Amino acid sequence: MLKFKNKFKFGSSNIDKSPENSQSLSPRNSTDSRKTISVNNLSENVGNLNIKDEEAEQVEEQQQQQIEEPAVQEIISNPGLLTIKIYNSNNIKLPIQINNNKQILNALANNATNESTQQQLNNSLTKLDDEDLIPGSISTNYLPANITIPNGENLIKSLLYLTVEFDNNVLIIEPQRGTVHQSTWNQVVSFDVTKKIGVNNSNFLNLNLFIRLPNLLIPQLEKLNNKKSFTNNGSNIGDLLIGSIKLPINLKNISNPIRLMNHDFLKFNNYNLNLKDDYGEIMLTIDFKPLIKPHLSIDDFDLLKVIGKGSFGKVMQVIKKDTKQIYALKTLRKQHIISRMEVTHTLAERTVLARITNPFIVPLKFSFQSPEKLYLVLSFINGGELFWHLQKEGKFSMDRSRFYIAELLTALESLHELNVIYRDLKPENILLDYQGHIALCDFGLCKLNMSNNDKTNTFCGTPEYLAPELLLNQGYTRCVDWWTLGTLLYEMLTGLPPFYDDDVSTMYRKILQNPLKFPSFLENTDVQDLLIKLLQKDPSKRLNDAIEIKNHNFFKDIDWNKLLHKNYLPPFKPNVENLLDTSNFDQDFTNEKPQDSVVDDFLSESVQKQFGGWTYNGDNLLS
Ligand SMILES: Nc1ncnc2c1ncn2[C@@H]1O[C@H](COP(=O)(O)OP(=O)(O)OP(=O)(O)O)[C@@H](O)[C@H]1O
């Protein structure tokens, strides 16, 4: 994958906002990520922009940040460590029938990882009748939980696996031995609990049990009927969701270690298929230990891989030494932030991330600083950028586009509820998680304290996604986010943003003047109607309310509550082996040696003071 990932922001020294004079930027047909523009990073001359306004805005924002505490509606729990022990699973059934393909079943049985399972499976197989299909309720008796890959140098592959998710952090675990019907797991996982445990998805412990089924065992009919249950990543194995458990966890006011569950059995349901049966059970113990480490530092983490580069530093995959949790660590060099006048945007990113609790926004776990750098510890999301998937496939199907846009819509809605405008929606800032759900990242252009009709003037965004009112420098409201949502939907469906042109000045002119055109396959569809309403050049005529957009016919089949609980199975599952897997990241980065580079910048006390409220150790919402 050849991709120029070193995205950077630049100011009006590089860009003239008048449509006629703009220079050409990041053509869409190249593999470059499109660049975010922000008027703040003015290193040389400031062109024709009113820098005074921007400075005033920064000062005002900084003051407001210090004064205004968010209205926190979410459940607040004590920070600490949540530990889940998984012992065994019993009576697991599949929600589908499988092909009675003796050759494959025998091969799987003979490669079961331990001998007693091999014998047990072979015994069962001798009694299996010759019907073409095996019912889901008994099929698991003929499948091993894990196998040793033949000629794979003792490589073990699990057919069964469980994802354990808490506060948008996911761990993938595999059983030790047994059949799919009854397996021994004996696995322990831990989660760092921070104080911000929100509404919606994040105060649940979510367990999803999957099976990797060889395609030859999946009947054609089941593939068609159960499209919703299979996720497709193009390989010869289908990942089938067997069932889920959603367990509400309330850690409010717990100040001593406590056992929340003790060897209890929980039953799997299949919400996705709306099936009422249970699909077996799993035995768990759950413990919570309140603890706070007053100050985190880079020494609390082992650095594993470089996974990306941002404007001010690197993003690395790291492991937290005490809890063994994998995270993404974003480093930002203070000197760069100061010299590009990006303090406000940087603090806004940290503030928004610490406040927000939407399941489709990458959660911030901790933030800390050294004299030279700022650090953000985020959940590690490893399904790859939507940008990369879109480039690979050219465009997405209607269903797939609808799914992503629906999840993003709720993310933007929750930002707007906090009076935050996102301003930089584009496929480069959207990550897919291991299941294929959206995780919006990069909050470096957020604008805080923007209630419904408040206007701002800062010229920033990404050329292809700029709304007309922004180009006209007329001041703009949160409505720009709905324009960018429309642009993104159009790009997903057609492969290009609506007014795309290789030449940026022509593109700006088109955004301002050209009528919206549709390819024939979109004509007279619900999505065409929605796009027309989102891509209204006059913001006063644009759809301007998340509820109104949600109620549009294009989303008529979406149950928004089910969506918010992540109970829709994504239409596409990225290839992700486990949480250590970095194969969806650019090798140019992952081949780099992960290190926290030493810099000897000297910053005066008054400059350091500007970063005062940065630290977040899981106990404070805003320090
Ligand atoms: N939580 C995360 N999990 C996995 N990868 C991440 C995460 N956050 C960021 N990345 C990777 O690092 C890259 C850079 O991160 P990000 O976009 O936040 O940096 P930035 O400095 O704000 O970038 P920009 O210059 O575009 O504003 C992302 O494109 C993504 O590939």
Image: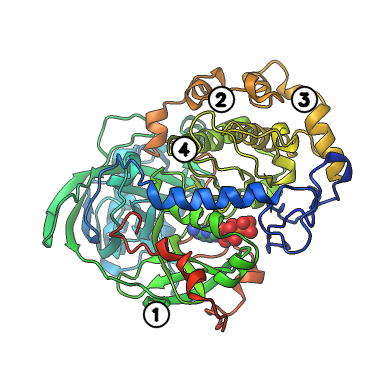
Instruction: Say which residue label 1 marks.
Output: 299
- Under mark 4, the amino acid is Asn
Disc 4 from disc 1: Cα separation: 36 Å
Identity of the residue drawn at 37% across and 76% down: 300
Amino acid at the residue labelled 3: Leu
Of the 4 image quadrants, the one containing the C terminus is bottom left
**Residue at label 4?**
419
| Spot occupied by residue 360 in the image (x, y as percentages of width and height) | 46, 44
Q: Secondary structure at mark 1?
A: helix
Residue in the image at 83% along x and 32% along y: 510
Q: Which residue is mark 2?
A: 544
- Give how far apart the Cα atoms at labels 3 and 4 are: 30 Å
User: Is residue 471 shown left or right of residue 569?
Assistant: right
The residues bearing labels 2 and 1 have C-alpha atoms spaced at a distance of 46 Å
Can residue 340 be seen here? The reply is yes
- Dot 4 crowding, Cα within 10 Å, few <14, some 14–19, many 20+: some
Task: Say which residue label 3 marks.
Answer: 516
* Badge 1 amino acid: Asp
Q: Residues within 10 Å of mark 2 (few under 14, many from 20)?
A: many
- Amino acid bearing label 2: Asn
**Earlier-in-chain disc, 3 versus 1:** 1
Q: Residues within 10 Å of mark 3 (few under 14, many from 20)?
A: some
